[in-house]
Image (cartoon, rainbow, N blue to C red):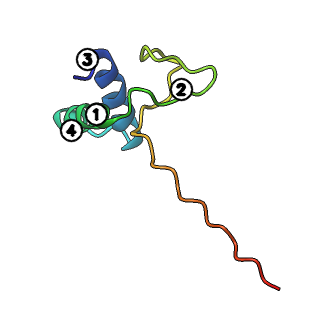
Amino acid sequence: MADEQAIRARAHALWEAEGRPEGRDTVHWEQARLELEQADPFAIVPDGATVDGGPESPPVAPPRKPRASRAKAATT
């Protein structure tokens, strides 16, 4: 289960990203909760970021799956 403070920080980031619309707090809260529940708990946090939802924290987004490397075929 996601931490309430983390959900609040993510919901706030979603609200700001949408231009601070009124009346969408429940939608942002639920989206943030779902994102954080699906996020990898072992994801790497960027240098200088905090994980406590403080003002220096970047918006929390679900981790992306790494792309498969595309090996170039050797041409002769």
For marks 2 and 3, the one nearer the N-term is: 3
Q: CA distance from mark 2 to mark 1?
A: 18 Å
Q: Are marks 4 and 2 in contact (CB under 8 Å)?
A: no
The residue where tag 2 is placed is: 45
Q: What numbered label is drawn on residue 72?
A: none
- Residue 48 pos. (x, y %): 62, 19
The residue where tag 3 is placed is: 4
For marks 2 and 1, the one nearer the N-term is: 1
- Residue 15 pos. (x, y %): 33, 36
In this rendered view, identify the residue nearer to me: 35 or 27: 35
For marks 4 and 3, the one nearer the N-term is: 3
The residue where tag 4 is placed is: 24
Name the kind of residue labelled 3 in the image.
Answer: Glu
Q: Nearer the viewer, mark 4 or mark 3?
A: 3
Secondary structure under the numbered disc 2 in the rendered image: loop
In the picture, measured across the screen, residue 37 lies left or right of residue 50, that is left
In the picture, measured across the screen, residue 34 lies left or right of residue 40, that is left
The residue where tag 1 is placed is: 32
Graded by Cα atoms within 10 Å as few (under 14), some (14 to 19) or many (20 or more), the crowding at tag 3 reads: few
Name the kind of residue labelled 2 in the image.
Answer: Val
Q: CA distance from mark 4 to mark 1?
A: 12 Å
Name the kind of residue labelled 1 in the image.
Answer: Ala
In this rendered view, identify the residue nearer to me: 3 or 30: 3
Q: Quadrant of residue 47?
A: top right
- Residue 61 pos. (x, y %): 41, 37
Q: Residue at x 43, y 40 (%)?
A: 63
Quadrant housing the C terminus: bottom right
For marks 4 and 2, the one nearer the N-term is: 4
Q: CA distance from mark 3 to mark 1?
A: 10 Å
Graded by Cα atoms within 10 Å as few (under 14), some (14 to 19) or many (20 or more), the crowding at tag 1 reads: many
